[in-house]
Image (cartoon, rainbow, N blue to C red):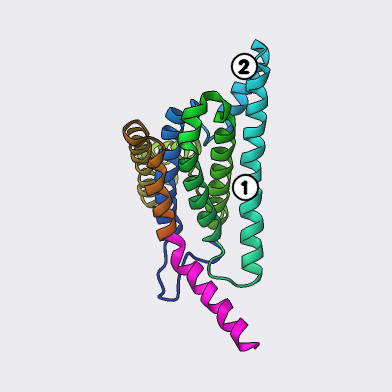
Amino acid sequence: MTGAPLTSERGWVLSHVELGAVLCFVAGAINAGGFLAVGMYTSHMSGVVSSMADNAVLGKWLAVWIGLWSVLAFVGGAMTTALMVRWALRRNLRSAYSRPLLVEAVLLLVFGLFGAAIDARSMALVPYAVVLLCFIMGLQNALITKRSNAEIRTTHITGLVTDLGIELGNLFYFNRSFPDAPKVRANRHKIANYLKLLVSFVLGALTGAWGFKAVGYIATVPLALVLVTLVVRPVLFDFHAWRRRLMARR
């Protein structure tokens, strides 16, 4: 793994797999809960693009337009993360990978606060909520992609399940059929990590669906607080360092 760790002045470090597990939980919750809220999955763009094609054939051009803006929002979220991380790494800031998560936490709170307005005005604000959720997911997916050197994605599990299947195929390969050939061996460490990420996504989806059904949009508040807990120390460390430098110049 390359890049700065998620750390603080106390030396607290979260590995990219641990971070990925937390973000898988958050993404699963947003994806499942968000579907109950706005009637659309927002964490993977393959489904959005397929829906655009279907709606174009059916002549539902408003849905196509919303889908297009959803894709652009996802791309914009990924671009925002890239710009923020690159800017912070150039300045050797400890919060390089924390800042996008702080933005995500704030936007989740915004989504939660907009919930009452969405319910009151029905379909009028739903497209904006969809675009906002897609931006959040693009922000998050780009973060873990950069942090893990493209080893982990968290907003969708297609690649994760594929990688898990490959390793399980290696695990159950019958080596005795070719005793003289090099042994096919599975990476058990990777299998454990893939299972951890998969379980985190599923638990997040269950929690998000239950939360939105039980309490509505306020279910995003705990997710935002989880993200704030992850990033507050590095962000505060860099803030205090900036303030000390500022005071030294006076």
Where residue 101 appears, x then y in whole percent?
Answer: 51, 55
Task: Report whether residue 203 is seen.
Answer: yes
Q: What residue sits right under mark 1 in the picture?
A: 78
Nearest the eye: 178 or 222: 222
Q: Residues within 10 Å of mark 2 (few under 14, many from 20)?
A: some
Tally the numbered discs: 2
Membership of 238 in magenta stretch: yes
Give the quadrant of residue 82: bottom right
Q: Earlier in the sequence, mark 1 or mark 2?
A: 2
Give the overall secondary structure of the magenta segment.
Answer: helix
Left or right of 48 on screen, residue 172: left
Q: CA distance from mark 1 to mark 2?
A: 26 Å
Please tell me the numbered disc located at residue 21. Answer: none
Region in magenta: 230-250
For mark 2, give the secondary structure: helix
Residue in the image at 39% along x and 41% along y: 218
Membership of 75 in magenta stretch: no
Nearest the eye: 166 or 56: 56
Report the amino acid beneath label 1.
Ala
Nearest the eye: 63 or 88: 63
Residue in the image at 35% along x and 48% along y: 192
Left or right of 94 on screen, residue 19: left
Q: Are marks 1 and 2 in contact (CB under 8 Å)?
A: no
Please tell me the numbered disc located at residue 54. Answer: 2
